[in-house]
Amino acid sequence: MSNVATGSETQSNNVPFGILLMIGATVVFALQDGISRHLAGTYNTYMVVMVRYWFFAAFVVFLAMRAPGGIKAVAQTSQLGLQIFRGILLVGEICVAVYGFTLLGLVESQAVFICYPLLVAALSGPVLGERVGWRRWAAIGVGLIGVLVILQPGAGVFDPAALIPFASALMFAVYGLVTRYAARKDSTATSFFWTGIAGMVFMTSIGIWFWEPMSQGDWFWMALLCVSGVTGHWLLIKCYEVAEASAVQPFAYFHLVWAAILGVSIFGEVIRINVATGAAIIMAAGLFTLWRESRKARA
């Protein structure tokens, strides 16, 4: 999720601390994925995501109340339609991702999902008008080869469910680009506020019709899911406050490592050779793209 800091006065560049915060965020988000998989395997995805968004919306309102000018100042935007679209797109992506966890497991879902930075790079030209050079296109091509290695579309009977995490990655990439577009006029705090509010309203309008009674034990897991979501976002916000994004972003790939550990140890998943190989290819292409971006930024 985006950095909420809106003023340059809060920025510093303590890279070691930023890396620790990023790794901490990936641990929390991997736990969140594992809990989501458990709950969505028992209850419907819409209800699980709806309750999660109730807590998230409360979090963004709390942050807005503490900001200069309060909620009124933070919520003010000249592109309300775009902000609502962002919020709905993200909550839709989360529903798709959680559904993918229940069908494919954490390992294969996350192995495909980590291609989203490459999709951001590919779409930044047509969506934002940014120039995409041949090196970036080459990295994107290599990364998509990694996705094909994981999906194995020519090996026996292809499972269409394998495309679900790719759809989730594509939606998240578009969300990231739209967020960058919105940032041309709105502060990060404003975008973060509407992400929570629009997502909560949209998800409640759907999820309330799919309510299911939940056991006391699973309410504990639901509470932990909500707390982990807020904790993960807070760690990410602090991470981008204390260090430059280009320095800490490569460590976001630890999310896949923790998800794989959870998938294997808790859910009995198996890491197939093609999944490990494809994920390594995608990560290498993504790290090359991040390296190129950081060099361009310095230049």
Image (spheres, rainbow, N blue to C red):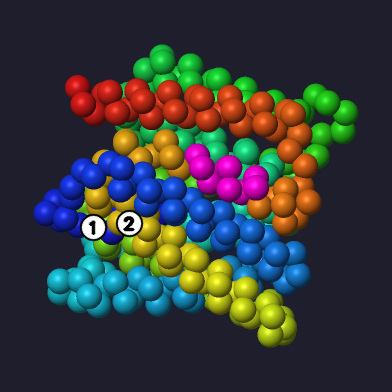
For the point 37% across and 17% down, the residue is 133
- Assess whether mark 2 and mark 1 are in contact (beta carbons under 8 angstroms): yes
Quarter of the image for residue 60 reads: bottom left
The residue that label 2 is drawn on is 237
In the displayed structure, 196 sits above or below 51; it is above
Please tell me the numbered disc located at residue 125: none
Looking at the image, which residue is at 48% across and 21% down?
139
Distance between mark 1 and mark 2 Cα atoms: 7 Å
Q: Is residue 121 left or right of residue 14?
A: right
Q: Which residues are magenta?
A: 253-261
Q: Main secondary structure of the magenta part?
A: helix
Amino acid under label 1? Ala
| Residue at the image point whose x is 51% and y is 71% from the top | 226
Q: Is residue 254 on the magenta stretch?
A: yes
Q: Quickly name the residue at label 1.
A: 5
Total marks drawn? 2
Query: Does residue 36 appear to the left or right of 228 in the view shown?
Result: right
Circle 2: element type: helix
Q: Quadrant of the C terminus?
A: top left
- Which residue: 32% across, 36% down? 247
Quadrant of the image occupied by residue 246: top left
Q: Name the residue type under label 2.
A: Ile
Circle nearer the N terminus (1, 2): 1
- Crowd tier of the residue under label 1, counting other residues whose Cα lies within 10 Å: few below 14, some 14–19, many 20 or above: some
Q: Where does the image place residue 271, in percent across and percent down from the top left?
A: 73, 38
